Amino acid sequence: MTGATTLDREGFYQTLASWKEDGPISVAVADIDEFLAVNQNYGRDVGDAVIALVMKALAGSLPPGSLLTRIGGDEFACALPGASPEEALIQLEEIRQYLAGRKHNVGEVSLAVRLSIGIASFPRHVSDPQQLLQAADEALLRAKREGRSRVAIYVEDKMVLKSNYYPKNQLARLATLSERLGRTEAALLREALADLLDKYREFL
C-alpha cells in the first residue's frame, strides 16, 4: 500500500516543528516548471487541473507514513519519515519522471508536467527539523538554476551565499518582504529567477 497523508499547510509545519522521533526525516519541496505559462496559455482552469494532477501523483506514489501539503500557488512540500535524502531522491525522481515523461489530460488539453524538486534531511543537513523547509527550498533553487525539471539534494558547501551577490540594503528588504508575505527568501529569489528566465527565453 502506498499513499501520503495530506495535511493543510499549518498542520504540516506543526508536524515538522514537533518532530521528536529518532532517525532521519527528509523533506522535499517541489514546484511546477513554467506554471505561469500554463495559466497564460491555457487558462486558470487548466492550471488548477495541473495542480490537482501533481497532488494526486504525489499523494498516491509516496510511501505510507509520508506527509504532503500544498504550500501555496504551484509549490508543494512532502515529508518522508525514516528516509535518507538518497531514498527520498529515488521516490521523488520516479514521480518527476512519471509526470514529465508522458502527456496527461488536464481539462481540454494534453500536456507533460515538469517539476523541479529540492530535498533536505534531518539530521544530515540541519540540526533542527524546523530548518528542513528552508534547506529544501535552497536545494530547489539550485535545481532551478541548473536547468529545471530535476531533483537536487541540499549540499551545504555548494550553496552560494546571498551575501556574495546582493548588497546589505537589498538583503534587508528581502528579509522584510519574506516576513510580511510568509514565504521563504529562497522562494522569493526563485520566483525572481523564473521571471528573469522567462523574460529572456529567446536567448536560452
Image: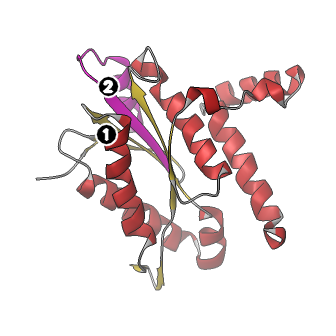
Image height check: is 178 above or below 61? above
Residues in magenta, as a range: 9-30
Q: Tell me the residue that label 2 is attached to.
A: 15
Q: Is 18 included in the stretch rendered in magenta?
A: yes
Distance in Å between CA atoms under marks 1 and 2: 10 Å
Q: Quadrant of residue 99?
A: bottom left
Give the color scheme: rainbow, by chain, secondary structure or one colour.
secondary structure
Q: Nearer the viewer, mark 1 or mark 2?
A: 2
Q: Position of residue 16 (x, y in %)?
A: 36, 24
| Type of amino acid at the residue the image marks with label 2 | Thr
Q: Who's the residue at 60% across and 71% down the image?
A: 38
**Looking at the picture, which amino acid does disc 1 mark?**
Leu
Q: Nearer the viewer, residue 199 or 45?
A: 199
Q: Residue at x 82, y 27 (%)?
A: 164
N-term mark: 1 or 2: 1
Which residue is at the far front? 157
Q: Secondary structure at mark 2?
A: helix
Question: Does 90 appear above or below 40?
Answer: above
| Position in image of residue 69 (x %, y %) | 38, 43
| CB contact under 8 Å: marks 1 and 2 | yes
Q: Residue furthest left?
A: 1
Residue 140 colored in magenta in the image: no
Q: Residue at 51% x, 65% y: name it.
A: 114
* Total marks placed: 2
